[in-house]
Amino acid sequence: MGVADDNRLVELEGVYRRLLPRMARVAAAILDDETLAVDAVHDAFVACVRTRQSFRGDAPIEAWVWRAVVNRALRTRSTRQRNDVVTDPVAVSESRVLPDDQTASVGVVVRLLPERQRTVVFLRYYADLDYRAIAQVLGISPGTVGATLTQAHVALRKALEKEATG
Amino acid sequence: MNADESRIVEILDEIHPPVVVRFKWERVLSDASAQPLGHPRTRKLALPRLLAVTILVLLVVGTPVLAVGASRGWWFQAAHQPRWWASWPKPVTGAPAIIASGRAHGQPWTGVAFISRPAPASSRAAIRGNQICFAIILGSRSNPPQSSACGAVKLRTTPRGQTLPLLGVAHWSIAEPPVIAGAVTAAATRVQVVLNPNPYPNGRKQTLKPSLNATLLARVGVRLFVVSYPASVGIDYINVFDARGRLLEHRRFG
């Protein structure tokens, strides 16, 4: 470990201080749970610090960290969904209070979007990333990002129209 | 951005408002075992630290479970609890007993047991009297449990009047390796967990014999057991015996 390694640590700290709130918000949107989200982002940064020597530098370090955060949140989500098998399970229902019917309706549609569309929407609107940056995070082309976002917009617009026409 | 898109952005803001976060870079570094910049690297500490971690791992893995959890920092003690936590069972008093821990998919998990109040009448699992509950928590123990299972803390009896000592079982398939934990009454002294690889390797059944451990929960006459098993198999049945070797209960699964 030398100067380059220390520089990378400085860069990671910069990303942490600059992007932590946005990363936590995207993780919270993916997980629908702020506590798990904060842990997921923390774990992602821990992993990035540990593996910083493997960062090749062929994309901005922000994209590398974003990818770690998104992957960690998605993995946590899939772990939670797998859940465990129990005998005599206690029924647990999740309820969220949403401000109005339209918000609730769009909220449901957002939750039902395919995973990639959801992730692209969150990275676009909560992380404020452009198509190129989203493409770097998800390892897809900017064109695919555009097409995915368009599909998500169509679904969300339909939800809005449906709610407006009652 | 057109009107629809503006409205979508507005609604997205309402669905997931910004998250209030505390910056803990030092903790990131310590969890990653990296040194913060400006601090001299302390190679001399590496060996003692490694030894300490090794001893800790040996204690966690080698000690047959059952440390009683510290009393603060659990999910049910959080000052601000989401509404949907309300329906989760909570300990009547004190802290849950930690009965197992490990890592699954890169994160730590903790399996706990505790005595809880009766389930609300609206619950599918409404039980009269207190319940013994198992829960698994991923990450920090302040996180709400990923799942929970509860059974009655009382002797069950067969139509012939025979008592059944197996109070409840939780099967944690997400753990690596998977874990089964359960509670039995004080009348039980031995438990067999028989696996069902379907078919059994070499045509032989595999039987696990977890030890039974008393915890603070013992004040209600409960003993806990926990044992891990290979991921590729399931649980066929559990046998519970008394001190004289008599079979008290044979519970089949799946």
Image (cartoon, rainbow, N blue to C red):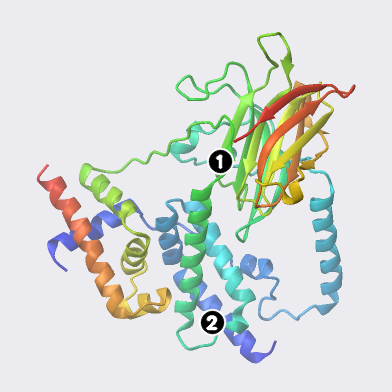
Residue B24 in the image: x percent, y percent? 58, 64
B130 or A45: which is nearer to us?
A: B130
Residue drawn where x is 57% and y is 42% of the image: B145
Residue at position x 48%, y 19% in the image: B121
What is the chain identity of the residue bearing mark 2?
A
User: Which residue occupies the extreme right position in the image?
Assistant: B244
Query: In the image shown, does A157 or B18 lie closer to the viewer?
Result: A157
Q: Amino acid at mark 2?
A: Glu
- In depth, the one of B5 and B149 nearer the eye is B149
Say if mark 2 contacts mark 1, CB within 8 Å. no
Residue B55 vertical placement versus B186 (above, below): below
Q: Secondary structure under badge 1?
A: strand
**Can you see residue B70?**
no
Q: Secondary structure at mark 2?
A: helix
Q: Is residue B180 left or right of residue A114?
A: right
Q: Tell me the tag on residue A11.
A: 2
| Chain containing mark 1 | B
Is residue B105 visible to us here?
yes
| Kind of residue at disc 1 | Ser
Instruction: Tell which residue pokes out farthest to the top in this image.
Output: B160
Can you give x and y, in whole percent of width and height, for residue B62 in the image?
Answer: 84, 51
Within the image, what quadrant is residue B13 found in?
bottom left
Q: Quadrant of the N terminus of chain B?
A: bottom left
- Outermost residue on the bottom side: it is A3
| Quadrant of the image containing the C terminus of chain B | top right
Expressed as whole percent of the image width and height from the top left, the position of residue A89 reads 54, 32
Q: Residue furthest left?
A: A165
The residue where tag 1 is placed is B147
A49 relative to A129 in the view: left or right: right
Q: CA distance from mark 2 to mark 1?
A: 38 Å
Residue under the image location 25 percent in, 54 percent down: B11
